[in-house]
Amino acid sequence: MKSLWLENETLSYSENTPKPVRADEALIRVRLAGICGTDLEMVRGYYPFTGVPGHEFVGEVLEAEDKRWIGQRVAGEINVSCGECEQCQGGRKSHCENRTVLGITDRDGIFAEYVTLPTQNLHRVPDSVSDEKAVFTELLAAALEIPQQVHIRPTDRILVIGAGRFGQLIAQVLQLTGADLPVVARHPQQQNLLKERGIRLIAGEDVKPQRWDVVVDVTGSASGFGLARQAIRPRGTLVMKSTYKGEMQVNFSSIVVDEINIVGSRCGPFAPALRLLESGEIYPLGMIAAEYPLNHGLEAFEKAAERGVLKVLLRP
């Protein structure tokens, strides 16, 4: 089959990748896929991986043991768990000790014509939600994990630092809480999209220190974390919502003294994400910068890596 292939931090296009076969999983034809920041970091060596990358997609089920799935348009959760380890038994399946992760850890991803996933990972996409919206399901679900982890009140002051692919959806999600919500956004397109949604902007140099109840860092950079640490008030909550290849120097003594809560935040709930896309309360289409056919995937990655570019899509 046709696919992109990542090996030794080198991305290539192949027409000879074996079609995935897992007897106990559904076979899915990929209809549309999205390139996210994690995919770009994978190419840069953030995590050692060989295989088909990618994890944001909408597809159609072609084969499944449960015939009710066949023909259904679906989005899929990226963590495949064993169901038996201590983490799974404790209800923490996304942290399964034996998990594989779509396009990231020990499992081929979705920059291909076909992919397989267990049916328990699949969610039906409502008919009224277009492929172009549905491809944002995984990213939106991850944004929704923040209010799952942190109790946010309408009286809270929230600061989001970073307004790229992920930061845009996080800002839209947190806007629904009614809290005071400015966003640090550097690029004009990012700023314009936020303005269109009625979300207030703030320059990094105007961020007052120790003022904010909740700060969400979506920059994946040491400088972004530095600004977040400066902004958070004592006993506030700092949410880390991005990963990157590298290390940061952190003054943990000041975090202890100021009693800062640091929350790592990763994957989130798909069902409410699909409901928000269906209702129109979240609108991601303005983020789409370009769409490429799969055989132009290398060009698509180059486009996605350009400064200020938001979402680039691939259509197999």
Image (spheres, helix red, strand yellow):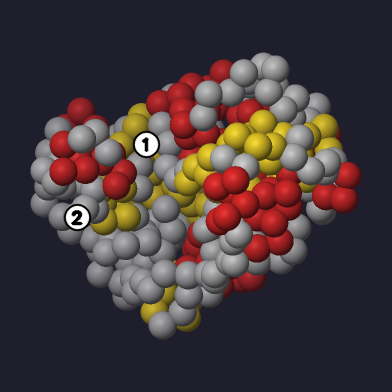
Looking at the rendered image, the quarter that the N terminus falls into is bottom left
In terms of depth relative to the viewer, which is nearer, 241 or 5? 241
- Could you tell me which secondary element the residue under label 2 belongs to? loop
Please report the residue visible at 40 percent of the width from the left and 26 percent of the height from the top: 271
Q: Which residue is mark 1?
A: 74
Please report the residue visible at 68 percent of the width from the left and 41 percent of the height from the top: 232
Task: Locate residue 11, reporting x and y percent.
Answer: 48, 76
- In this image, 5 relative to 79: left or right? right
Please report the residue visible at 72 percent of the width from the left and 34 percent of the height from the top: 212
Foreground disc of the pair 1, 2: 2
Looking at the rendered image, the quarter that the C terminus falls into is bottom left
In terms of depth relative to the viewer, which is nearer, 73 or 225? 225
Q: State how many labels appear.
A: 2
Task: Locate residue 133, reporting x and y percent.
Answer: 56, 36
**Amino acid type, residue under disc 1 in the picture:** Val
**Amino acid type, residue under disc 2 in the picture:** Asn
Looking at the image, residue 166 lies above or below residue 151:
below
- Rendered image: mark on residue 98: 2
Looking at the image, residue 316 lies above or below residue 66:
below
